[in-house]
Amino acid sequence: MTSLLPFFMEGEVVKGFGRGSKELGCPTANYSLEVVQSIPKDMAPGVYYGWAQVDSQMVHKMVANIGWCPFYENKEMSVETHVMHKFDSDFYGSNLKICVIGYLRPEKKFDSLNDLIEAIQQDIKNADAKLDEYEAKVLKEHKYFNNTNNITV
Ligand SMILES: Cc1cc2nc3c(=O)[nH]c(=O)nc-3n(C[C@H](O)[C@H](O)[C@H](O)COP(=O)(O)O)c2cc1C
Ligand SMILES: Nc1ncnc2c1ncn2[C@@H]1O[C@H](COP(=O)(O)OP(=O)(O)O)[C@@H](O)[C@H]1O
Ligand SMILES: [Mg+2]
């Protein structure tokens, strides 16, 4: 599993079930099923941390859930990224690039919504600390994020 990391992926931000913001207080930018199905089959489901870039804007810290959301018993796998930044508005339809660096924990079927919310808040804290480490910071500067599509001459 570790050998798959860092793992880079990109795709359009599409609509999910609308639970992230409303029920969990944690919006997650979802990829389409087509993009989700392009990830390696041996990528372990779970909660990961890394870097995220919406269109060609600044690179921010992120936590991502990759899997089936056992609490909600989703039928399809999803890849959802919570970008650790306050945006002024939604960005559905934007291109989202992520660099998945490390694994935090497996997905769990929590007993209550509150337990899931608390776990997500702890994941964000853990990701924040991990991403301050030197090995992670180097990847923020990776050329993957450094395209010139947004430059008009
Ligand atoms: C950091 C993080 C950790 C998560 N951990 C779990 C988990 O342990 N179990 C689970 O069922 N879902 C987990 N989720 C996924 C949420 O259930 C999911 O984001 C939520 O259902 C929102 O889905 P939506 O984008 O379709 O609205 C996690 C999401 C994030 C961002
Ligand atoms: N910090 C953020 N991280 C991720 N998405 C965000 C953030 N701020 C705003 N959004 C917007 O919120 C949407 C995700 O909210 P969510 O409730 O999970 O809805 P959905 O179920 O449609 O994914 C994203 O697609 C994006 O447009
Ligand atoms: Mg979402």
Image: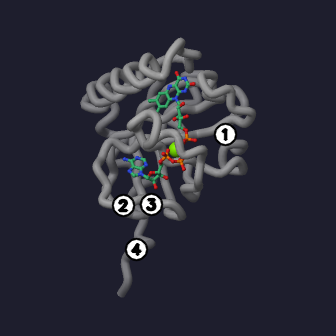
**Is disc 3's CB within 8 Å of ligand 2?**
yes
Residue appearing at x 47%, y 29% in the figure: 48
Mark with earlier residue (1, 4):
1
Task: Say whether marks 3 and 2 touch (CB < 8 Å).
Answer: yes
How many labels, in total?
A: 4
Q: Nearer the viewer, mark 1 or mark 2?
A: 2
Mark with earlier residue (1, 3):
1
- Quarter of the rendering containing residue 139: top left
Q: Which mark is residue 89?
A: 2
- Between the C-alphas of marks 1 and 4, the distance is 27 Å
Can residue 99 be seen here? no
Q: Which mark is residue 150?
A: 4
1 vs 133, left or right, is right
Say which residue label 1 marks: 39
- Between the C-alphas of marks 1 and 2, the distance is 28 Å
- Between the C-alphas of marks 1 and 3, the distance is 23 Å
- Quarter of the rendering containing residue 78: top right
Q: Amino acid at mark 2?
A: Ser
Q: Nearer the viewer, mark 1 or mark 3?
A: 3
Say which residue label 3 marks: 91
Could you say which is closer to the camera, residue 113 or residue 84?
113
43 vs 26, left or right, is right
Residue appearing at x 39%, y 39% in the figure: 62
- Between the C-alphas of marks 2 and 4, the distance is 20 Å
Could you say which is closer to the camera, residue 32 or residue 25?
25
Q: Amino acid at mark 3?
A: Phe
- Between the C-alphas of marks 3 and 2, the distance is 7 Å
Q: Nearer the viewer, mark 2 or mark 4?
A: 2
Q: Where residue 68 sits: x, y (%)? A: 65, 29
